[in-house]
Image (tube, grey):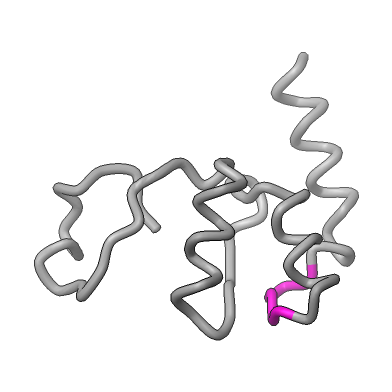
């Protein structure tokens, strides 16, 4: 998943999902195309990742292990 279609990897990819990493629907769309999702904590949508993990989808690292990081980043953004 990328934010813009003109990224360096676009010419190599078979398929692009263009969207923001916090976009819940785009994360669900991505999960339909891959077997495992990995992410950078500060960019991820915690709700979507937790829902996927609870449904049995492989998400690494586990969003549950990083729930404090998600909450801390939300507080920082709202500050």
Give the residue drawn at x 77%, y 49%: 47
Q: Does residue 23 belong to the magenta stretch?
A: no
**Magenta part of the protein: which range?**
57-62
Instruction: Tell me which corner region of the image, top left, top right, bottom left or bottom right, holds residue 11.
Output: bottom left
Q: Position of residue 65 (x, y in %)?
A: 87, 66
Q: Position of residue 45 (x, y in %)?
A: 67, 47
The image quadrant where one finds the C terminus is: top right
Give the residue drawn at x 80%, y 61%: 50
The image quadrant where one finds the N terminus is: bottom left
- Looking at the image, the residue that sits furthest to the bottom is 35
Residue 8 shown left or right of residue 50 in the figure:
left
Q: Nearer the viewer, residue 4 or 33?
A: 33
Q: How many marks?
A: 0
Q: Nearer the viewer, residue 74 or 31?
A: 31
Residue 64 shown left or right of residue 47 in the figure:
right
Give the residue drawn at x 79%, y 45%: 70
Q: Position of residue 26 (x, y in %)?
A: 50, 51
Q: Position of residue 4 (x, y in %)?
A: 25, 43
Q: Nearer the viewer, residue 51 or 60?
A: 51
- Looking at the image, the residue that sits furthest to the left is 11
Residue 45 shown left or right of residue 30 in the figure:
right
Q: Nearer the viewer, residue 12 or 75?
A: 12
Give the residue drawn at x 68%, y 76%: 60
């Amino acid at each position: 998943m990328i934010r813009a279609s003109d990224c360096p990897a676009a010419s190599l990819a078979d398929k692009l999902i263009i969207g923001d990493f916090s976009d819940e629907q785009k994360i669900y769309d991505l999960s339909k195309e891959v077997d495992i999702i990995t992410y950078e904590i500060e960019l991820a949508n915690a709700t979507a990742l937790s829902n996927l993990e609870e449904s049995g989808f492989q998400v690494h690292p586990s969003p549950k292990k990083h729930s404090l990081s998600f909450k801390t980043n939300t507080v920082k953004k709202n500050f």
